[in-house]
Amino acid sequence: MRFFRNYLVLFFGLGAALSALIVYFIGVPLLSPVGPRFNDSVDLTHQNYLALHKPNLVLLGDSLVEENVDSAALSTLLGQQVYPIAYPGSSSAVWYLIIKNNIATSAHKPETLILLFRDNLLTAPGYRVSGPYAQVIETLATSDDSLVAQRSYIDLMHPLERWAEMYILPYHQRLNIRERTEWFLRYPLPRLVLGCKNPCVDKSLNTVLESKNMEPGILSEVVFNSASYLYSDALLDFEQQLPRSYLPEIIRLGRENNIRLIFVRSKTLLFPNQASEPSALDAYMTHLAEYLRANGAIYLDLEQGPNIPDQYFIDFVHVRPDGKIPYTQALAAILAPFFQQP
């Protein structure tokens, strides 16, 4: 019993000391509110592009937009000026913020917004919102984006985690501590030894870690492990997930800004046949399609469109460079009826 008491005294003593150091060196309050706090330093790159170039069509999504779609070819095939907005690894929180704080606030609003997504990403607000993805969200959110703080963070916390966020400062500041530690590990040595400054280090790491440089089997395993979180029974319950998601808000923003919304489900190789799919996925996609159509949006499915041969895929979701045109042609084929001139 004495040893446990001493352990607790040491544990809380070290925690108090670490909290004092954090308050002193980082300058944060001792007690912190639960969830992230956003400021108004919003990246308005896309808003400014829209106002300057006035494209008719915006294609929004994650790395699928960047790696699977040839935007210039899509523009030619559809006879529309296409502006691609790709945030690799992003999900619905980022897409909602782009629409709310860049597209809907632009002096020029596109006639059509196409959202390219995989399966149930549209109703998974907690998917990919931590680590580097949290940094992206911070650049896109404003101080009034409490909905994102609530749905992507606070609602998903265990009560004990909320308590720790408020009262245990090292826990609340864990990402800040990690970021500063990574900075010291990443930048000083290359600068000292090689004369390679921060942008040089970032560029080198991004080049080395590009997906095209990864062994296909390992890359596929990484993608599958990352995606497996999405296919739990809870996240495949459309009716349960819908009110917790950003989808109703995206629909509202499109309607209020007179932007036609087209949601395109991408083809994947995650499940090679019907028998290997989660039993609830089919029902989920049916409910999603019904909801979108009932709310004035267009739902299209590349899984059921023109065939994109499996050999073009480098992993479960991305195509090789030589598969970009076939993928783009398949996408254009299902979109073309909505862009035919009268």
Image (spheres, grey):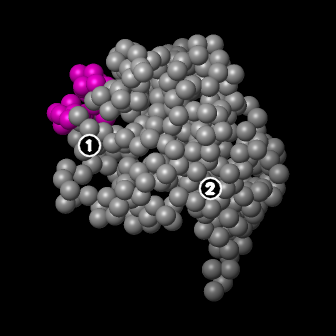
Q: Position of residue 88 (x, y in %)?
A: 46, 34
Mark on residue 25? none
Q: Which residue is mark 1?
A: 304
Above or below, 226 relative to 181: below
Q: Which residue is mark 2?
A: 151
* Number of marks in the rendered image: 2
Q: Quadrant of the C terminus?
A: top left
- Residue 203 seen from this side: no
Please identify the quarter of the rendering in which residue 12 is found.
bottom right
Q: Position of residue 22 (x, y in %)?
A: 75, 49
Q: Position of residue 251 (x, y in %)?
A: 57, 45
Residue lying at 38% horizontally and 49% vertically, measured from the top left? 119
Looking at the rendered structure, the secondary structure element under dot 2 is: helix
Front one among 299 and 210: 299
Compared across the picture, whether 223 is left or right of 165 comes to left
Looking at the rendered structure, the secondary structure element under dot 1 is: loop
Q: What is the magenta range? A: 307-329
Question: Which kind of residue does numbered mark 2 sit on?
Answer: Arg
Residue lying at 42% horizontally and 37% vertically, measured from the top left? 116
Which is more foreground, mark 1 or mark 2?
1
**Residue 217 lies in the magenta stretch:** no
Badge 1 crowding class, 10 Å Cα cut-off, few under 14, some 14 to 19, many 20 or more, is few
**Residue 315 lies in the magenta stretch:** yes
